[in-house]
Amino acid sequence: MAHSNTTHFTNPSTFILLGIPGLEEAHGWISIPFCTMYIIVILGNFTILFIVKKEQSLHEPMYYFLCMLAISDLILTTSVLPKMLSIFWFNAREIDFSACLTQMFFINSFYLVGSGIFVAMAFDRYVAICHPLRHSTILTSPVVAKIGLAVLLRSGLLELPLPLLARQWPYCRTNIIPQPYCLHIAVVSLACADIRVSSYYALAVTLCGIGLDALLITVSYIHVVRAIFKLPTKDARLKTFGTCSSHLCAILAFYIPNLFIILIARLGQILPLHFHILFANLCLLMPPTLNPIIYGVRTKRIRARLFSLFTQKGI
């Protein structure tokens, strides 16, 4: 493996993931928060899925979308954390070339799926607050299923060209990736070719995907806020706004880390590489970790059902 950064080759059979370069001695300690996050993601999201399935009163569009978000978060974190922890714990740095591209696809796709589900949840809140009498006729179970399928297909189709483009580039410099997982830009930067097509396409997907989603969510909530302020009493306004609070917190937990990642990227020449990589990974994994906590704590019906389960078991 010592010659892997100097040998000339084309399309290597494996890549070498370095983890957090410069902090190799601290990998064991760094693994603790990441392992904790993974445990929270697994327990929290499976708990939400279990509660929504068992509680008939939660069989509504809002909670169906929440289940979709939980599944998306589970797939996203499982695409990243098991390999990351194997690097930290067992120094298992090698990853097959095809497995690397597959990991890249799943990370990008399900990150975009999460963004699309937030748009669907914003639409649900818009219909529930601005057109409450039509909510049950607009967001029927078949419509919710079609929205979920559309979000999944959109993400898959938009992100599929990225690994396909990455596969066609010749790699003749090195197979060492200074990351704990196969980040798209980190992989294609190793290619001995003009990768502007990949870079421009990735930027276009970000702008048309995440950017457009953020715009749609903003527009939805402008209408929601206007409708709330038209309510006659303060109690009615607070109660209606409370139905959106969990969703708003989850949106902030999703999009604010993106802003920090962009800011850190701008300061990449100033900040140490290990800080940049560590912070970017925390920002990627923070939303899936926070989502079950946010919805479990702030959603009264889920919280009540969770307490009732503990009470029934005598906890």
Image (cartoon, helix red, strand yellow):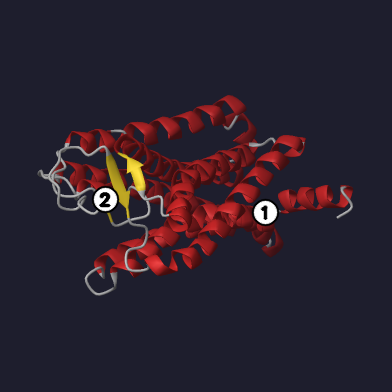
Residue 69, horizontal then vertical, whole percent: 54, 43
Q: Which residue is mark 1?
A: 296
Residue 13, horizontal then vertical, whole percent: 26, 37
Residue 183: tell me if it is visible: no
Query: Residue drawn 31% across and 34% down?
Result: 98
Q: Going by the image, does 99 lie left or right of 59?
A: left
What's the amino acid at mark 1? Gly
Query: Residue drawn 40% across and 44% down?
Result: 107
User: In this figure, what is the number of numbered marks?
Assistant: 2
The answer for how far apart the CA atoms under marks 2 and 1 are is 46 Å
Q: Which residue is mark 2?
A: 1
Residue 207, horizontal then vertical, whole percent: 29, 48
Give the farthest residue toward the bottom: 270
Instruction: Assign the C terminus to one quadrant of the image.
Output: bottom right
What's the amino acid at mark 2? Met
Residue 145, horizontal then vertical, whole percent: 55, 28
Q: Is residue 212 above or below residue 19?
A: above
